[in-house]
Image (cartoon, rainbow, N blue to C red):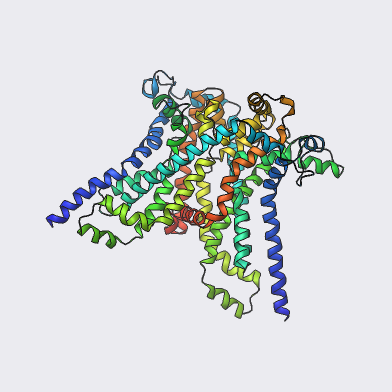
Amino acid sequence: MKRSFRRRSASSIVNVTLMCVCLLCMIPLLAIVTISFSNEKMLVDNGYRLLPQKFDFTAYKYIFSNESIMVQAYKVTILVTVCGTIIGLLATSLFAYALSRSLFIFRKLFSFLVVFTLLFNGGLVPSYILMVNYLHLKDSLPALILPYLISAMNVLILRTFFRQIPEAIGESAKIDGASEWTIFWRIVFPLSKPALATIGLLILLVYWNDWWLSLLYIDSPKLLPLQLMLHRMMANIEFLRSNIGNLSGLNTSQIPSESARMAMCVLAAAPMLIILPFFQKYFVRGLTLGSVKG
Amino acid sequence: MMRTKKITGIDNIYLSFMSAPGMLLILVFSYFPMYGLIVAFKKYSFDKGILGSPWAGFSNFEFFFSSESFWPVIRNTLLLNLGSIVATTIASVAMALLLYEVTRSLLIKIYQTTLFFPFFLSWVVVSFASYAFLSENLGIFNSLLERFGFDAVGWYSERKYWPIILILASVWKNVGYGTLIYYACLISIDKEYFEAAQIDGASRIRTVWFISLPFLFPVLTILTLLSIGRIFYSDFGLFYFLPMQSGMLMSATDVIDTYAYRTLRILGDFGMSSAVNFIQSVLGLVVIFMANYAARKIDKDSALF
């Protein structure tokens, strides 16, 4: 009797602690959402609050009503994310499959070259010179896509997964005259859908949340992706005023700049946060695999 | 015999063809920059390229070593990264142990997803959230302080708070990921150990201390060593976006990565930034070899290579 009471109180302490920590995790997010739905005048008078004093959708109306820079940034990000994820997943899985085949003559050499990039890299300056001076990709969309197509970690995770598929499955197909190319597409690819989904989501997340490549290589406002555009908004509120104001012909002082910039932030972060609960299983699998052993 | 050999030949052509795009991308985007590291010893000019630029000996390094940013930047990089590694590890292990005590699977899923949310936000988005709290005239912290009768704090101009702010932000963003890994480790422990301990009348605290922690220890050591192996590399976004480029905070928040970025993109000084970059790459390699050596000593299977 006494024992079970102690157990129960221990478990409620655990739950209360975890709930508090979870609350701490959500509060910053809550702050952004609240501000984005707040009345601009209230914000300026009373400062930011965690709970809205008065609901107001003006900020969102402004963002959606104008052919604003936000829409353009969304287009850039979606284009880059879609292209990057599809091409990246394709290149990664083909490469990982080749590296998983024990008969492949370059297996050892290529695997070494992949693993070595985890230990040593040239870093910022040579990569910048490569992109700007040798590939001449400054201020272009490929600059936002190419560098992230292949990640050594993803190749290694997928290789480990492909290795677990018994080679005997491929052998029988081979006797029937199937090539490695056919075996990959007909047998290995359909069998590996969960692993491919995991890697695909990891690549997707990297592209959606990226600001690094655009910070380095993009100058033209038309090619700004969401994340960097947000940063520009924060760094310079005038940038926000002029970009919304000019296009809609509004008096710039009427623009709800405080709430509008938080609203943009919500819109930029939302897609990833919405898919997280549905695909958590896949993310969890990929991230635990990647962390412990390649 | 003849038959297998012939098939292997064709297969190898197919496999080479399949690995070509990936290998090409790695050669261009990882190996070319390694070769490009030699610009640290050159006086780089855009027209002449890497090979054509004249050699400069160690002058780029001399500039960096004699600049007043040298020590603060190295110190910030090492201390802030070390602080984040220690704090994130402790927080993640604690959360994983707590999560392991929860029995209802729905609750486990809710807690895990919530802890994981910040991991999916970019640092730009996080910098908006931190601004909502720290803004000097509108921020939530300052209005709380004022309500309780304290003076408002100029968060973006007072250096002393920033080491703590940066470390807390790093813990906040990464704790979900760490928890995930340690929790995965805990659920792989054989339940019989806990049952046996319970029969012997061990308290919960004692089972955590004598069963869970010893089981976590190898993974914990390896992961810590591997993150120490990357101690010269910082999470650029954290140090670049959160302080809002406030000049007054620079000496407390500038790390190798942000310094190299600024000298390259803002000042356009190739020499200086390539020297910093070179030091980072080479020290990074040395440290990761040391960390791997230590990991191998502890558990041969867990070493990276």
Name the quadrant containing residue B161. Answer: top right
The residue lying at 55 percent from left, 36 percent from top is A74
Question: Relative to B1, is B257 above or below?
Answer: above
Residue B225 left/right relative to B87: left
Question: Relative to B121, is B4 above or below?
Answer: below
Please identify the residue farthest to the front as the structure is shown.
A65
The residue lying at 47 percent from left, 58 percent from top is B298
Residue A104 left/right relative to A289: left
Please identify the residue farthest to the left as the structure is shown.
B2
The residue lying at 27 percent from left, 43 percent from top is B17
Please identify the residue farthest to the top as the structure is shown.
B47
Closer to the camera in the image, B227 or A95: A95
Question: Relative to A187, is B272 above or below?
Answer: above
Quadrant for the N terminus of chain A, please. bottom right
The residue lying at 52 percent from left, 54 percent from top is A279
Residue A51 left/right relative to A271: right
Count numbered badges in the picture.
Answer: 0
Please identify the residue farthest to the right as the structure is shown.
B149
Give the percent coordinates (x, y) of residue B53: 40, 20
Give the percent coordinates (x, y) of residue B303: 44, 54
Closer to the camera in the image, A182 or B250: A182
Q: Inspect this view and state whether residue B73 appears.
A: yes
Give the percent coordinates (x, y) of residue A246: 65, 23
Q: Inspect this view and state whether residue B156 appears.
A: no
Question: Relative to A19, is A270 above or below?
Answer: above
Give the percent coordinates (x, y) of residue A96: 35, 49
Closer to the camera in the image, B218 or B139: B139
